[in-house]
Each structure stands twice: as C-alpha cells, then as structure tokens.
Image (cartoon, rainbow, N blue to C red):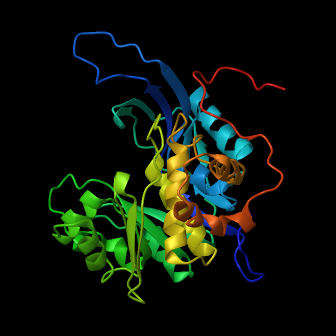
Amino acid sequence: MGPVRGPADPDYDVFLTGTVFLDIVFTGLDSAPVRGTETWARGMGSSPGGVANMATALARLGLHTSLAAAFGDDHYGEYCWDALEQGEGIDLSRSRTVPGWHSPVTVSMAYEGERTMVSHGHAAPLPDGPRPACPPRARAAVASLTPGRSEEWVAQAARQGTRIFADVGWDDTGRWDLAALGDLEHCEAFLPNAEEAMRYTRSSCPRAAAHALAEKVPLAVVTLGAEGAYAVDGRTGESASVPAIEVAALDPTGAGDVFVAGFLTGTLAGWPLADRLAFAGLTAALSVQEFGGSLSAPGWVEIAAWWNLVQGAEGQDPAALRRYAFLVPLLPVPLRPWPLRRAVPTIGFGRSA
C-alpha cells in the first residue's frame, strides 16, 4: 500500500532524527546470564538499531521517510547506511558520516519474553559547514520526549504543519512530571506504555491514565503489553481498545517502535481509531517473531501473508478475524516472497545474487 498523499502535500511523509546503533541480538537464552559463567545463545542477529527501528518500520509500510542521523565511518556505520538507504529506501540526505567517530553499539539479550541491553557509544561531534534544511516539510514526524529538554526542531516542524507523534522513555529523575515534557504541547499523539502513562498522570490504571493524557494532547495511546492497547481521542471523546495478538515471540526489540509506525500510518490514512490500534498491534506482533529491531519490521507483503495464513487456520474466532477485515482491500495480490533484508549473524557477508 502506498501512502494517501494529496497534490499539495510535502515530499516526505515522515521525518525523524536520533541515534543509529548497530544492534547485536542474542536469542534462545533460557535465563539471564549468570556472573562468572559463559552462556551460549541458540540464535544471534545483527541489524541497524536505535532510531533505525522506527525509520525502517515506517518505510516498510510505504511511507516516504527522511532520517537525520550521524553514522560512524567504520564498517558498522557503512553497513547501517547501506541497509537503510539501499535496502529500505530511506532518505539520508540530512544524515552525515563522521570521520573518526565509531558507531554506537547495543548488545541485546532476549529471554523469558523480555530483553536486557548493554550499549556503548559517544555523542557525535557537531558538524562543520552548512547543513541541509532540517526539519524538512513532512506530513508527520516522530519525536522521543525527554524530561527537562525541548528540541527546537519539534516546535519548528509543528509550525510548518507537521503532525508530531511522540513516545517517551523511563524518567531517570523519578519526578514523572508532565510539565517537564516541554514538547508535548506540539504533539498530536502521545504513545507511552502503561507504566509510563500511570506514573505521569498519577493514575491507578492505564485507561484512567489515557483519559488524563487526552486532556493534554489530542490523541493519547497507552500500550498494555499482552493486553493490547487503549486510546482516547481528546477532541471527540472517542475511546477504543484492541486486544493483543498472541504470538511466539523470538525477540521483542523494537516492537514499540513498530507499534508507533503502524499507528502513524493508519492516522495519515484517515482510518477509524480502533482500526489504527488493531493495525499497530498487528505489525508489532509480527515483528517480535523475527530477529532484530529494524529488520524484523513487517511490510505489506508479510501482512498479506499473515492474513492468508489465519484465514485457513483451524479454530479461528470469526469475530476476531472481522476485526482485521478492513485490511483486505489494501493487501497486495498476488502474494510474493518477502524481498527485504533480515538480521544476520554477522555483517561481513556479501549480498547473494
């Protein structure tokens, strides 16, 4: 499916900026590593990570995506640049390679349905000379909010008419003060998880937290893990709840990014709130069945393959299937093999013919 774009719309559907990591993911661990011992993983994959998770998920859903990021001039940086620009068609004209700067790296260990990560990196030096206009005009942008810090590009993008979708990380200060999220005032949608939402609103349940957030931002979406997601439209008062899809999870890395990408896609397409939630949850569920945060993101071919599979599976709840019937007119036909990259154990191999 291509994006729904009008003749007066800007060239880019989505803009985002942030740090690109080289992710090395270990899976098949029965438990957390024990100090003083050696633990062998049954699976391993490498892929671009960090902001690349979101950029790839958006691009694979057909959105023309612009990413501004720094890349190291080492082999890791070369691999990440190539994977994003050549492999995914992401516009990197606002990105740069930094001589003498090494790529940030994250090692992720997946076990018991969760993950533990160890990262290393240094802030990229400021660029010399003129830079491309940033942010560009785009239909939407994705921001990661940080307590006590505002990003000028967010306000500038909002002034240009860009619709801002934002998530947030754990508040290490422990204050959990919504007023400290200065860029929230520019956002159309805010998508925290249940724990974050409850702490920021001092609420006792995620649904109450979503309603409280909807007083601050037009769209409040709270992810509920295995229970799905709940959303409130603060402009209309509409709310929607969609259960999660049960899958055998291999690696949860980047699932939250894929969820945001799916919800953003549905919003730009003008879908009803419940359909946006269902689609976001579906894309996230498909992503956790593959290695890596970015290269596990599904595209429309994989979504079509999933729909084809569940249609023929025994024991399916007809009501549950009807929840996703809105996708049928959008799915590619006929089905073809998925052509994009997957995470691989090492980045040194050449491409196959």
Location of residue 303 with respect to 137 vertically, above or below = above
* Camera-nearest residue between 132 and 353: 353
* Camera-nearest residue between 195 and 127: 195
Q: Quadrant of the N terminus?
A: bottom right
In which image quadrant can residue 202 be found? Answer: bottom left
Give coordinates of residue 290: x percent, y percent: 55, 36
Residue at left offset 38%, top offset 32%: 120
Residue found farthest to the bottom: 236
**Does residue 331 appear to the left or right of 296 in the view shown?**
right
* Camera-nearest residue between 229 and 16: 229
Residue 102 visible in this rendered orientation of the protein:
no
Instruction: Please count the marks in the image.
Output: 0
Residue at left offset 78%, top offset 81%: 7
Give coordinates of residue 219: x percent, y percent: 42, 77
Residue at left offset 71%, top offset 40%: 340
Residue found farthest to the front: 315
Give coordinates of residue 285: x percent, y percent: 50, 49
Residue at left offset 59%, top offset 32%: 343
Location of residue 214 with respect to 265 vertically, above or below = below
Residue found farthest to the top: 37
Location of residue 25 with respect to 243 vertically, above or below = above
**Does residue 287 appear to the left or right of 65 in the view shown?**
left
